[in-house]
Image (cartoon, grey):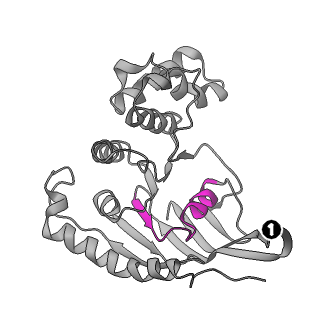
Amino acid sequence: MSAIRAENITKTFKVKNNGRQNGNTHLTALNNVNLEIKKGEFLALVGPSGCGKSTFLDIVGGLTQPNSGAVYIDGKPIDGPALDRGIVFQGYALFPWRTALENVAFGLETKGVPKSERDAIARKYLSLVGLSAFEGRYPYELSGGMKQRVAIARALAYNPDTLLMDEPFGALDAQTRDILQVELLKIWEETHKTILFVTHSIDEAVFLAERVAIMTARPGVIKNIVDIDLPGQRFDEDIKSSPAFVSLRQEIWSQLKEEVVRAQNGEGNGKHA
C-alpha cells in the first residue's frame, strides 16, 4: 500500500480583479493531480515557480483543503494536520525565547510528554543532526544551517511517519546546502521516513530523491516521473559530476524547460470563472 496517494486533487483560489475582490474570479493552482508515494520513499517535486508545488505539500500536510479530490495516507483520507506528518519550511520558524533543546522538545511538550522524557528525545534528535554541543544555544546564537538542523530535529522528534519539506535549504549558502543534503540522506537512511521534498533545484532533486515528479506550469499537474538510478554511494563527493547524474539532470531539465518557458510567457495562468 502506498504511504501517500493523491487522487484528482484540484485547488482554486479567489483572486483580486483590478484591486477589487470578485467572488466569481478564481485561479486554478492544481488541476486533477494524481500521485503515489511509496512507504519509505524519498520523492522530490520540481516545477516552475507558481505551479502549485507548495500548495500540494500544504494539502498533504492538512494545512489546506482541496476543492475536489482527496489525499490518503495508508488508505485513510487526510482531513487536517496530524502527528503522522512532520513539516519543515524554508523559514526556520523557531521560537527565539527557547533554546535549541526547548525548540526541538516543543511538540512533545504540547503532547504532555514528561520533561525528562522529552528532553532525552530532543537530545537524541539534536545528536542526529550534529548539534549536541549547541542544545543550550538560542536561535540568535546559531547560523542559518544550524537553525535549519534544529527545525529538522523538531520535525523528527515526535516520530512522524512522513516528512514534508518545502525548499528547506533554499535560503542557505551553497556550502551549507551541500552539507545538509548529505545529512538529510543519512537521516533518511537511518529513520526510513517517507519524504516529500519540494525544490527548485534539479541538482538537489537528483542527488536526494529516488524519484523526481515534474509538474507543469499552472494549473499544475504531474507531467512525468523520473526514476533516479545512480550507481554507487550517494555520499560520493564526485557523484554530481558522474555521467549518470549529468544525464538524469539533463533529462529532467529537458522536460521542465518547456514548462518554465510557458510560465514565464504567461501561458499557464490557470482557468478563470
Q: Is residue 192 left or right of residue 100?
A: left
Q: Is residue 216 visible?
A: no
Q: Residue at x 69, y 83 (%)?
A: 271
Q: Secondary structure at mark 1?
A: loop
Q: Is residue 210 above or below residue 61?
A: below
Q: Position of residue 42 (x, y in %)?
A: 39, 58
- Magenta residue span: 41-61
Q: Is residue 129 left or right of residue 232?
A: right
Q: Amino acid at mark 1?
A: Gly
Q: Is residue 66 above or below residue 103?
A: below
Q: Residue at x 32, y 72 (%)?
A: 227
Q: Residue at x 42, y 22 (%)?
A: 123
> In this view of the protein, which residue sits in the foreground, 36 or 204?
204
Q: Is residue 189 above or below residue 264?
A: above
Q: State yes or no: residue 183 in magenta.
A: no
Q: State yes or no: residue 56 in magenta.
A: yes
Q: Position of residue 214 (x, y in %)?
A: 43, 74
Residue beneath label 1, please? Answer: 19
> In this view of the protein, which residue sits in the foreground, 81 or 236?
236
Q: Position of residue 27 (x, y in %)?
A: 71, 75
Q: Quadrant of the C terminus?
A: bottom right
Q: Position of residue 168 (x, y in %)?
A: 45, 48
> In this view of the protein, which residue sits in the foreground, 4 or 183?
183
Q: Is residue 146 above or below residue 174?
A: above
Q: Residue at x 44, y 22 (%)?
A: 141
| Crowd class of label 1 (few under 14; some 14 to 19; many from 20; radius 10 Å) | few
